[in-house]
């Protein structure tokens, strides 16, 4: 193998290594692709949690609009309200 062949092979190897560098570490390379896939997976999980939370909230809104007993229960527990004709018994603190 003469010097010319060695130079051509060396240049070819350098070009090949340059392509590997660009593919692996360059902009939109393999590392970026991996990070984007991880971000996509994280966003999908967040989206699923938000969809589940939305379903719970929609059910609560529906019950608030249509379920009198549910509204009454919330009024009793959260607002301390009592029904008509009911008597409140207070426990004396010692």
Image (spheres, helix red, strand yellow):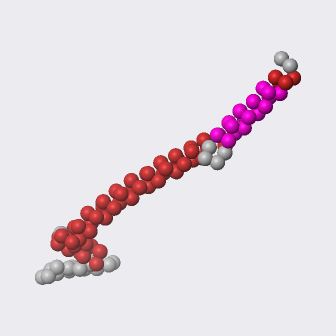
Q: In the rendering, at what x and y percent does residue 21 appear?
A: 69, 39
Task: Farthest residue to the top: give it.
Answer: 1
Please check the rendered image and state whether residue 15 is part of the magenta-colored stretch, yes or no: yes
At a point 78% along the width and 26% down the height, the residue shown is: 9
At a point 35% along the width and 60% down the height, the residue shown is: 53
Q: Is residue 50 visible?
A: yes
Looking at the rendered image, the quarter that the C terminus falls into is bottom left
Q: In the rendering, at what x and y percent does residue 55 appear?
A: 30, 60
Q: In the rendering, at what x and y percent does residue 56 appear?
A: 30, 61
Q: In the rendering, at what x and y percent does residue 5 appear?
A: 82, 23
Is residue 54 depicted above or below 29 in this figure?
below
Closest to the observer, 81 or 5: 5
Q: Is residue 24 left or right of residue 83?
A: right
Closest to the observer, 86 or 57: 57
Q: The magenta stretch spans which residues?
A: 7-24
Please check the rendered image and state whether residue 52 is part of the magenta-colored stretch, yes or no: no
Is residue 81 depicted above or below 37 in this figure?
below
Closest to the observer, 44 or 70: 44
At a point 49% along the width and 50% down the height, the residue shown is: 40
Q: Is residue 34 left or right of residue 81?
A: right
Q: Is residue 73 visible?
A: no
Is residue 8 depicted above or below 44 in this figure?
above
- Splitting the image into 4 quarters, where does residue 77 fall? bottom left
Most common secondary structure along the magenta stretch: helix
- Splitting the image into 4 quarters, where does residue 29 fall? top right
Task: Farthest residue to the right: give it.
Answer: 3
At a point 69% along the width and 37% down the height, the residue shown is: 19
Is residue 42 depicted above or below 86 in this figure?
above
How many marks on residues? 0
């Amino acid at each position: 193998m003469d010097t010319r062949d060695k130079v051509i092979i060396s240049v070819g190897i350098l070009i090949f290594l340059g392509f590997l560098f660009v593919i692996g570490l360059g902009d939109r390379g393999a590392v970026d692709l991996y990070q984007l896939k991880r971000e996509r997976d994280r966003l999908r999980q967040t989206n699923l949690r938000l969809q589940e939370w939305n379903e719970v909230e929609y059910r609560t809104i529906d019950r608030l609009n249509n379920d009198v007993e549910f509204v009454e229960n919330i009024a009793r527990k959260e607002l301390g309200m009592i029904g008509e004709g009911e008597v409140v018994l207070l426990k004396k603190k010692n």
